[in-house]
Amino acid sequence: MAKIRPDFESSLYARFLKWVRDGSDRLDEDMAGMQADRSMDPSPAPPEQDMERVMAERKVYDRAQEWGSHQGFRLRNRTYSFLSLFLCLSIIAVLLYATSQLPAFGRAGNPAHNEVSERYLEKGMEETGAVNLVSGMILDYRAFDTLGESNVLLTAVLSVIMLLHMQRREGDPRQEMEDLADQTLYEPRHDPILQTVTRVLMPMLLLFGIYVVLNGHLSPGGGFSGGAVLGAALILHTNAFGSSSTRRFMNMRIFQAVTGTALCFYGLAKAYSFFVGANHLPSIFTPGTPGRLFSAGLIPYLNIAVGLVVACTISALYTLFRKGDL
Amino acid sequence: MDLWQSIPLLLVILPLVSACLCPALPRRGAQVFCGGILALSCLAATIFMPAITSLGASYTYSMGHFPAPWGNELRAGPLESRMSWFFMLVLLLTFLGGLRCLNHDIPEKKTSVFCATLLLIASGLNAQVYTNDLFTAYVFLEITTLAAVSQIASRPGGRPLLSSARYMIMNMVGSSLFLLGVILLYDLTGHLLMSPIQQSVSALVESGQYHTPLTLVVALITVGLGIKSALFPFHAWVSDSYSQGTPMGSAIMAALVSKGYLFLMLKVIYRVIGRENFAATGVDTVLFIFALLGMVLGSILAIRQTDLRRMVAYSSVAQIGYIYMGLSLNTDAGMMAAVFHMIAHAVCKSMLFLTCDGLIAVSPSSRLRDLEGSGFRAPLTGAAFTVGALSMVGFPFLGGFSSKVNFALSAVDLQDPRTFLVLAVLVISTWLHTLYFLRAVITIYRRSPEDTVSKGHLHRGFCYSLSLVMLILLNVTLGVMSQPLINVLRSGLTLFG
């Protein structure tokens, strides 16, 4: 324990530490600087005869302190911004240079035009039963990635809940103020134009969203885009009628139930299909007749699951950022 | 295909599906459920190990009805099975050890969400270990990162929020660099599956085509994963992120999440780029320099700390440097030493973070000088901390010693100027490690002049003691009987490429 020595500050090791510390964590130093109490003066009163010398010394010290906290701080910040700018520009230059050497866009002989994309395009409809090849690709050929991606959405919502969900302080006057503000200040004023338009638009938006989700394997669209439309409709409803109105059909319990069920169904259905696929067993889900609503094996059901997850996630993120709770 | 060969699928899907259910459960139920699923995963991984060893080869498991380049694929071999077993075991033990703190660290409503993120991390780690597809690896890497962010943010207060924001920004930069590398690599090779990428890359290197973009790809992926696993110049986020979370969260992040990224790096070197091609780009030399600097400067940063948890966090930077040093040597022995150290460090670091919190709980503050005598007030915790510290230093009969011997042997095998450099840095780094870890051990076992009993004893329950005893045993086993594991890892690495 070298640090207990009384003359530690003047030792060689301490000066070495100081030198090392110069290039250290900016955040730490900034936070330490904020907390440090500058008014403290621990040095004992000096003897009379040394007063002049000490005053001169202190002046020098104060000036250095002044410089360090004003010009020095500014200089460091400037150097830092300059260096980061330089770094960013050089990375941009390197990336641009390397990208210019890549295979030219759209040429027939490019490496990306190989047997993989060929089979997707030529046999995609026959093998997956989906007319929309993108759906066939993301929900059948590469369904494992999409399973991961839907779970990324869940993880994002969980992280936001973790960040924004506040512990209620019962009986605290500030909590009551906040509740009051929540009910009045942060709620939409009852705007007749917005409410009328929403009443007209809501059914159409919901219908369109459901259409995009259900036809994901037949026409452009699918769970992700249809779910985004549904989520937008929910957000519109919140804005027009207030969150207490939306909360009737979109609250924490419903969110958990819907997302949990949808993702569970997705995970279990795909686990089944991965398992039979790897063991070369026949699956109960067959491609069917391409073009029918009930065709393409699991794809329509997975689209519904993804659509529900996306719709819930979008509206949950909006509500969480706005109210701190679902 | 036998039934046991589906275990990798189970190890990925089971925690993933359970994570969707977990947030809806009440506090106690979520904890029991999460522990049960982790125990089940651990059991499955345990069954998987002897089976794959008796198979004597690695196999691919196609995810769905479509064969490899069109569909997704998992690939399992002896190395992957050991890695996943250690990940699941350490995760389970850390969960048991940190369970009691969870109840008073985290608001009640957030506990089930915390358990869900824990399961997501488990699934993400297994997917990173078993996947044979670069894009799948990216997706699960994102899941792991986001889940880790909420693990830090779970503790109420300003500093954890700030650290989690910092962690997220740095890790998103790492992820995007990695993604950029994957996109450019797809443009150059037309594949996302690992083995076909390697064939195309070898052809490109042979013909000398696209040399600059290829070098950039290797650099982007290496730097991306380097940022995420706290390689030396990209380590600035480490101290806050590892010291501000719950003890369980810190232990998991330092011990497991960073190892997942490191294992992915190993996979990139072996299976995606190929070892010869990796050496041809020259990125390994840069990595070597960064690793050596990290080994020394990480320890110096740790010496500077006055806070116990920050000290242990900074020691991770040095230890990650060891692993990257082994990877950058690009020899069989070096790779083996790196993989062994991933395991040894995971087992040791999780224990250190758990015990750190135990020691702080019986002391006035987390400052090193306030910890005096805490080893007497919490005897088992103190003993476990001592074992962990000695293992990090490289004391014989402990895991850290075996990996240091492996690193030294791999350096001696090189027979070029790097030998001397590696050995010298190993000596310096060991010396620096001794300096700060022994300082901490001596501090916790020094009786302070005041009455120590008044500060109370540690009550953490049976689970905590069980997990510490198991972790101590694991550390000792890795040190005393490392040879069987080393043999398996060596044969696993030959099947890995």
Image: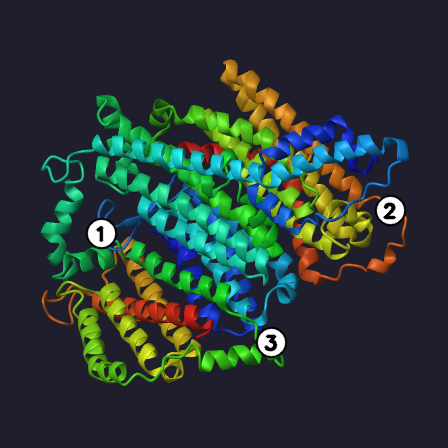
Residue at 50% in and 18% down = B414
Q: Compared with residue A90, is residue B54 higher up or lower down, i.e. above or below?
A: below
Q: Is residue A108 left or right of residue A51?
A: left
Q: Position of residue B314 (x, y in %)?
A: 60, 40
Badge nearest the viewer, 2 or 3: 3
Helix, strand or loop under label 2: loop
Q: Quarter-wise, where is residue A92 in the image?
A: top left
Write down the residue under mark 3: A169
Write down the residue under mark 2: B447
Q: Position of residue A63 (x, y in %)?
A: 66, 36
Write down the residue under mark 1: B66
Residue placed most toward the observer, B486 or B248: B248
Mark sitting on residue B41: none
Q: Position of residue B278 (x, y in %)?
A: 36, 27
Q: Is residue B332 visible?
A: no
Using the image, name the chain to which the residue with label 1 belongs: B
Amino acid type assigned to the residue bearing label 2 in the image? Arg
Mark 2 surroundings within 10 Å by alpha-carbon count, few (fewer than 14), some (14 through 19), many (20 or more): some
Same chain letter for marks 1 and 3: no
Q: Is residue A213 left or right of residue B256?
A: left
